[in-house]
Image: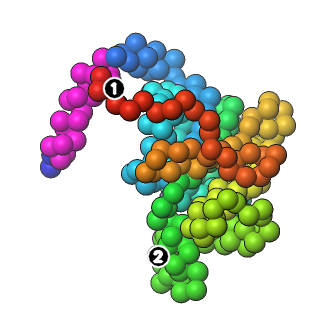
């Protein structure tokens, strides 16, 4: 069974552009291993690509993606804790300096949570069980300062990011890395249509747009 043609074509383009340009980086990374300074917890959504948004190349971002960019609370129980395993490796194995929880607009996972708040999904559905992680966020949301947009979908997206940051702090090694070596946690939100990036200001506790020079009218095709 062959891969879809457009993937093979894309791979061909990658070899002749991205790889050729970064050949030395690849060789260095293969020889010495990875040392990314930043970990990103992002959504599976195909429209939100951390490497694309931050224009990072191979070896620069340690990324874990899941439905609705959620971090579960620390749990010392049996089970396959995929996101927690990635966090453990990022913090203890790679000693990342920053963890960014990157949420986004029109998040399907958040939408599913909002739609099923009063009509729980069938037992056994993975998404239903996973997005239950948002329940404390929904409760906490009522106590947070009102964000500039009252849109309930956006408010829940913000609350999910805040809850994930809170849950990160429940991991003993995260708390330790922050205290002992100054690791920082960040919340950010990305708008798919406009590419606007908002970052959680821990002083004002609000998501604020990142200042940037005006976008050039014509995209550079090279
Ligand atoms: Zn999403």
Using the rendered image of the protein, determine whether residue 90 is visible from the camera's viewpoint: no
Secondary structure, magenta segment, majority class: helix
Q: Badge 2: how crowded within 10 Å, few (<14), some, or many (20+)? A: few
Some atom of ligand 1 lies within 8 Å of the CB belonging to the residue at label 2 = no
Q: How many marks?
A: 2
Helix, strand or loop status at disc 1: loop
Q: Which residues are magenta?
A: 3-20
Q: CA distance from mark 2 to mark 1?
A: 44 Å
- In-front residue for pair 70/189: 189
Residue 207 got which mark? none
Q: Determine the residue positioned at 68% across, 71% down.
A: 138
The image quadrant where one finds the C terminus is top left
Using the rendered image of the protein, determine whether residue 108 is visible from the camera's viewpoint: yes
- State which tag comes first along the sequence, 2 or 1: 2
Look at the picture and state if 20 lies above or below 134.
above
Q: Circle 1 is placed at which residue position?
A: 220
Q: Determine the residue positioned at 34% across, 16% down.
A: 21
Q: Circle 2 is placed at which residue position?
A: 125
**Residue 181 drawn at (x, y percent):** 80, 30
**Is residue 198 left or right of 179 when viewed as pictured?**
left
Look at the picture and state if 202 lies above or below 66.
above
Front position among marks 2 and 1: 1
**Residue 87 drawn at (x, y percent):** 63, 45
| Labels 2 and 1 touching (C-beta < 8 A) | no
Helix, strand or loop status at disc 2: loop
**Is residue 197 left or right of 185 when viewed as pictured?**
left
**Residue 63 drawn at (x, y percent):** 52, 41
Some atom of ligand 1 lies within 8 Å of the CB belonging to the residue at label 1 = no
Q: Badge 1: how crowded within 10 Å, few (<14), some, or many (20+)? A: few
- In-front residue for pair 54/119: 54
Q: Which quadrant of the figure has residue 76?
A: bottom right
The answer to whether residue 152 is magenta is: no
């Amino acid at each position: 069974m062959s891969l879809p043609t457009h993937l093979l074509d894309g791979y061909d383009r990658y070899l002749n552009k991205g790889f050729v340009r970064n050949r030395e980086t690849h060789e260095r990374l293969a020889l010495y291993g990875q040392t990314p300074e930043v970990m990103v917890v992002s959504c599976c959504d195909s429209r939100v690509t951390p490497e694309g948004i931050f224009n990072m190349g191979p070896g620069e971002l340690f990324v874990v993606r899941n439905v609705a960019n959620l971090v579960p609370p620390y749990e010392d129980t049996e089970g396959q804790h995929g996101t927690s395993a990635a966090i453990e490796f990022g913090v203890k194995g790679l000693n990342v300096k920053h963890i960014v929880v990157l949420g986004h607009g029109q998040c399907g996972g958040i939408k599913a949570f909002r739609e099923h708040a009063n009509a729980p999904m069938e037992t056994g559905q993975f998404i239903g069980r996973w997005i239950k992680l948002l329940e404390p966020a929904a409760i906490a949301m009522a106590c947070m300062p009102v964000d500039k947009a009252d849109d309930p979908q956006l408010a829940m997206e913000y609350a999910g990011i805040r809850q994930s940051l809170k849950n990160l702090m429940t991991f003993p090694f995260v708390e330790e890395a922050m205290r002992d070596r100054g690791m920082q946690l960040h919340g950010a939100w990305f708008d798919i249509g406009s590419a606007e990036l908002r970052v959680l200001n821990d002083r004002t506790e609000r998501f604020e747009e990142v200042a940037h020079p005006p976008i050039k009218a014509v995209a550079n095709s090279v």
